Image (spheres, rainbow, N blue to C red):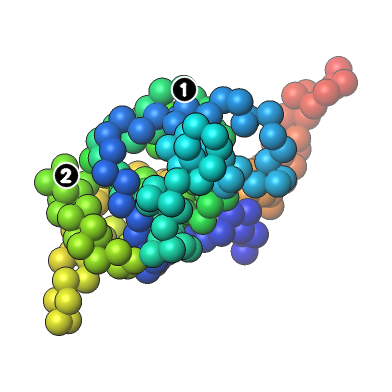
């Protein structure tokens, strides 16, 4: 059985934090001046640092992620073109280290999306009108939760009185499988170690001249 190298992601119900901003780029997610900090200490203190702090470096109590209602949030909902800009993987580290497993937006920067999937975080693209509804619902009920079901590829928003709204989303099947199994590329390779060893042995037996040092 494959040994998980990331925390598996299947179904998540978590507080959703609304960030009603478009074009949040990787430099906003993790300002470049913090990239020399060791990852081992976590990048979460620097997530959206310049939006979350005033000019003197003091936390802005009105910024969404500084508000008690959103403590422990695991889902972030933002507007279009989230994660554009540079290729810095640290932008994803900052979100992951802050506890976010899912970001919902109408669209993502291509490299950000790839980096997110490789680090165990799911970017969910929904229509802009749907995201607007989610943002409005979260603004009306601070601290509300959203459920994300990766196997079923759905986002569920509680509407009160037992009612829910369910929205489907698309995800690359290969990346979905890795997220569900909690594997990155290294973990996937390790999970295939027996097959790799068997292939190497079979080939060495059938084609010994390919081995290093062979005649």
**Label 2 sits on residue:** 127
Q: Where does residue 40 sit, x and y in percent of width and height? A: 72, 45
Tally of marks:
2
Viewer-proximal residue among 110 and 172: 110
Quadrant for the N terminus, please: bottom right
Residue located 75% across and 24% down the image: 210
Viewer-proximal residue among 41 and 148: 41
Find numbered disc 2 in the image and state the secondary structure of the residue it sits on: loop
Q: Is residue 140 something one can see in this rendering?
A: yes
**Above/below status of 52 relative to 34:** below
Q: Do tag 2 and tag 1 residues touch (Cβ < 8 Å)?
A: no
**Above/below status of 156 relative to 40:** below
Q: Which mark is residue 86?
A: 1
Q: Is residue 188 something one can see in this rendering?
A: no
Please indicate whether residue 42 sits to the left or right of residue 51 in the image. Answer: right
Q: Residue furthest top?
A: 215
Residue located 69% across and 34% down the image: 37
Q: Where does residue 147 sit, x and y in percent of width and height? A: 31, 66
């Amino acid at each position: 059985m494959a040994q998980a190298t990331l925390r598996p992601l299947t179904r998540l119900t978590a507080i959703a934090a609304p960030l009603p901003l478009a074009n949040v780029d990787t430099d906003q997610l993790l300002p470049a001046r913090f990239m020399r900090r060791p990852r081992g200490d976590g990048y979460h203190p620097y997530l959206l640092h310049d939006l979350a702090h005033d000019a003197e470096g003091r936390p802005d109590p009105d910024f969404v992620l500084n508000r008690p209602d959103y403590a422990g949030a695991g889902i972030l909902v933002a507007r279009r073109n989230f994660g554009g800009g540079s290729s810095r993987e640290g932008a994803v580290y900052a979100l992951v280290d802050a506890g976010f497993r899912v970001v919902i937006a109408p669209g993502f920067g291509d490299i950000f999306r790839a980096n997110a999937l490789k680090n165990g975080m799911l970017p969910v693209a929904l229509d802009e009108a749907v995201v607007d509804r989610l943002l409005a619902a979260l603004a009306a009920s601070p601290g509300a939760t959203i459920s994300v079901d990766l196997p079923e590829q759905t986002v569920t928003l509680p509407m009160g009185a037992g009612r829910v709204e369910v929205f489907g989303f698309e995800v690359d099947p290969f990346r979905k499988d890795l997220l569900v199994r909690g594997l990155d590329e290294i973990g996937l390779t390790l999970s295939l170690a027996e097959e790799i060893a068997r292939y190497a042995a079979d080939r060495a037996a059938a084609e010994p001249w390919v081995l290093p040092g062979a005649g």
